[in-house]
């Protein structure tokens, strides 16, 4: 996704915490600004954070429906949209569009 213009928050380990009613994410202190590139090793990258948790992508689950009903998950004390990402070939581009422009359904994800 970074190749498409997204910013790095964290690679492997993410620190999640609440700030009031908002779930926030940031890189664990010892790995901030690092990302693993398979076959190359650890690379330095500019990272951002903390950032609000806008949605969760479950990379172990496939979405059988073309236009699925909204799903959600509780992260700490905040409910956020849950997306199934396994097997979605255009996932990076689709997620970038979601982050930039939101969903066509104004009720989901809640923005």
Image (cartoon, rainbow, N blue to C red):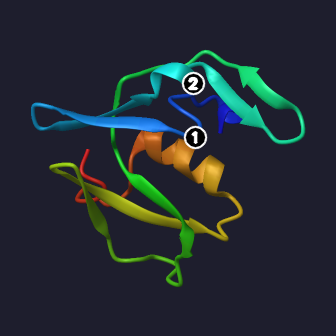
Residue under the image location 46 percent in, 20 percent down: 29
In this view of the protein, can residue 100 be seen by the observer? Answer: no
Residue under the image location 28 percent in, 59 percent down: 108
Give the vertical position of 17 relative to 90 (above or below). Answer: above
Q: Do the residues under discs 2 and 1 have CB atoms within 8 angstroms?
A: yes
In this view of the protein, can residue 13 be seen by the observer? Answer: yes
Image position of 45 (left or right of 6): right
Residue under the image location 59 percent in, 31 percent down: 6
Residue 81 appears at what percent x and percent y? Answer: 32, 58
Residue under the image location 67 percent in, 18 percent down: 45
Relative to the observer, which residue lies in front, 70 or 105? 70
Relative to the observer, which residue lies in front, 104 or 54? 54
Q: Earlier in the sequence, mark 2 or mark 1?
A: 1
Residue at the far right in the pictured view: 39
Residue 11 placement: quadrant? top right
Instruction: Identify the residue position indicated by label 1 in the image.
Output: 12
Q: Which mark is drawn over residue 80? A: none
Instruction: Identify the residue position indicated by label 2 in the image.
Output: 31
Relative to the observer, which residue lies in front, 52 or 70? 52
Image position of 9 (left or right of 55): right
Give the vertical position of 9 relative to 13 (above or below). Answer: above
Cα–Cα gap, marks 2 and 1 = 8 Å
Count residues near mark 1 (Cα–Cα under 10 Å), then give few for <14, some for 14-19, many for 20+: few
Say which quadrant the N terminus sits in.
Answer: top right
Residue 26 appears at what percent x and percent y? Answer: 41, 28
Q: Secondary structure at mark 2?
A: helix
Count residues near mark 2 (Cα–Cα under 10 Å), then give few for <14, some for 14-19, many for 20+: some
Image position of 76 (left or right of 88): left
Residue 37 appears at what percent x and percent y? Answer: 79, 36
């Amino acid at each position: 996704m970074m190749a498409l213009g997204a910013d790095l928050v964290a690679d492997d380990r993410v620190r999640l915490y609440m700030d009031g009613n908002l779930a926030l994410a940031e890189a664990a202190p010892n790995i901030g600004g690092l990302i693993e590139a398979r076959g190359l090793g650890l690379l330095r990258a500019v990272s951002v954070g903390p950032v609000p948790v806008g949605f969760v992508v479950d990379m172990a689950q496939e979405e059988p429906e073309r236009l699925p009903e909204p799903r959600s998950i509780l992260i700490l004390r905040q409910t956020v949209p849950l997306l199934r990402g396994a097997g979605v070939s255009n996932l990076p581009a689709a997620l970038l569009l979601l982050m930039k422009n939101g969903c066509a359904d104004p009720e989901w994800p809640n923005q």
